[in-house]
Image (cartoon, rainbow, N blue to C red):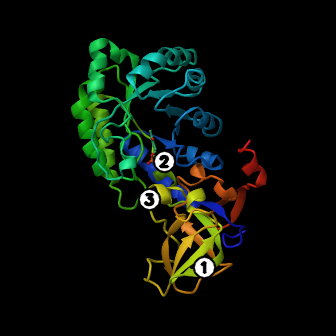
Amino acid sequence: MKINEIPTPAYVVDEQALEKNLRILGEVKKKAGCRILLAQKAFSMFAEYPLIRRYLDGATASGLFEARLGAEEMGGENHVFSPAYRPEEIRSIAALCDHVIFNSVAQLRRFGGTVRAVQQERGIRGGIGLRINPACSTQDHAIYDPCAPGSRLGVTVEAFRQALEEEPDFLDRIDGLHFHTLCEQNSDALEQTLQAVEEGFGSWLADAQIRWLNMGGGHHITRPDYDRERLIRLVQHVRRTYGTEVYLEPGEAVAYHAGYLVTEVLDTVENGGVHTLLLDASAACHMPDVLEMPYRPPLRDAGQPQERPYTYRLSSCTCLAGDIIGDYSFDRPIGAGDRLYFEDMAIYSMVKNNTFNGMALPSIWRMDGSGECRLVRRFGYEDFKQRLS
Ligand SMILES: *Cc1c(COP(=O)(O)O)cnc(C)c1O
């Protein structure tokens, strides 16, 4: 089936675009000499994991469920970071993950021994990490800034120093350091962050005990204007200076501009000169980042309001008055039965969707290089009902 024939609403992952991103990431890995993992929280469509695994080293998780998914479907290296682990889950996590990264000194002290023991049984060495907070904000989206004052994410230099004072061989507890501070950023922000990391944590990074540095996600590596040569230089600098391995764990960059949300117009409403299209897709349910971030998703064959002759407000069938995707203009009048194609909808879409108002979950499709679409999964009433009691 072609994309203009499939039932809506639907997420369609463009495998050609996905593989193009993966090829870029594979090239970076090779030139920089680092490892790259998929951050599953951005994109967990495991039907594509075999393709991803051809280029990347494995996956990283935010907790037990994603760690299981990575182990079952990706293979390769399996890492996890969570702001806090539960005592009843830590053994399972250690049994599944090659790297377990802690967010605080207290969590490391509480669970580090258990993780070490389980990993040793599995023959894994060097698998315990600590997330650091370099206190270096490089962006303006406050809700995406782990370096904001009072942030709960990562151990500050002060806390790290205090741990060493309390426990002179504190570094023996860890094998690597991790930071994640970027969001949709270029490598200039990484350069600035690395400077802060080196200033604050450089002497510990240089300790022979520390074998790896994980530089987190938020690197928009596959974006056309991303300066990959600088990223490669920075990774090589870390490897050379500190003798550590380097990991990157992008989410967005893996499936950047590699999917559509296909929707159909159900009705048009006019009020006070505003023409609103009611879609069978919703920002609140199917692309919550549009409201949370917020941002305006790109839409195929449409422009800014008033840029083209026919301007509409795009909204949905939920009861939420603010479930508005944005105002867009078109070359021709749009009405019931027309289809619209939101772009860049592979990331932070499927992983975040919900059935608020009993809205249907979009089906999931894959599109190959010839434009042929194949159904991966369809959802129905039972998927809605079984989560509610
Ligand atoms: C969100 C997150 C990522 C991936 O971030 P992207 O912006 O999708 O690249 C990687 N690591 C950690 C710890 C994260 O929280």
Give the number of the disc on residue 111: none
Q: Which residue is mark 2?
A: 251
48, 384: nearer the viewer: 384
* Amino acid type of the residue tagged 3 in the rendering: Pro
Total label count? 3
The reply to whether residue 361 is in sight is: no
Q: Which residue is mark 3?
A: 294
Instruction: Inspect the image, locate mark 1, and give the three-letter code of the amino acid beneath it.
Output: Val
Question: What is the distance, in whole Å, between disc 2 and disc 1 at their CAs?
Answer: 38 Å
Per the image, label 3 sits on a secondary structure element best described as: loop
Of pointers 2 and 3, the one earlier in the residue sequence: 2
The residue beneath circle 1 is 269
186 is higher (above) or lower (below) than 174: below
Q: Residue at x 59, y 27 (%)?
A: 96
In this rendering, the label closer to the viewer, 3 or 1: 1
Does the beta carbon at disc 2 come under 8 Å from ligand 1?
Answer: yes
- Residue 79 relative to residue 378: left or right: left
Task: Tell me whether circle 2 and circle 3 mark residues in contact (CB < 8 Å).
Answer: no
Residue 386: percent from left, percent from top: 75, 45
Residue at figure coordinates x 29%, y 36% from the top left: 134
Judge whether 280 appears above or below 305 on screen: above
Label 2 SS: loop
Q: In x, y percent, where is residue 62?
A: 52, 36
Q: Earlier in the sequence, mark 2 or mark 1?
A: 2
- Which of the 4 quarters of the picture holds residue 128? top left
In this rendered view, identify the residue nearer to me: 183 or 336.
Answer: 336
Residue type (three-letter) at the residue carrying disc 2:
Gly
Residue farthest along the right direction in this orientation: 382
- In whole angstroms, how far apart are the C-alphas of marks 3 and 1? 24 Å
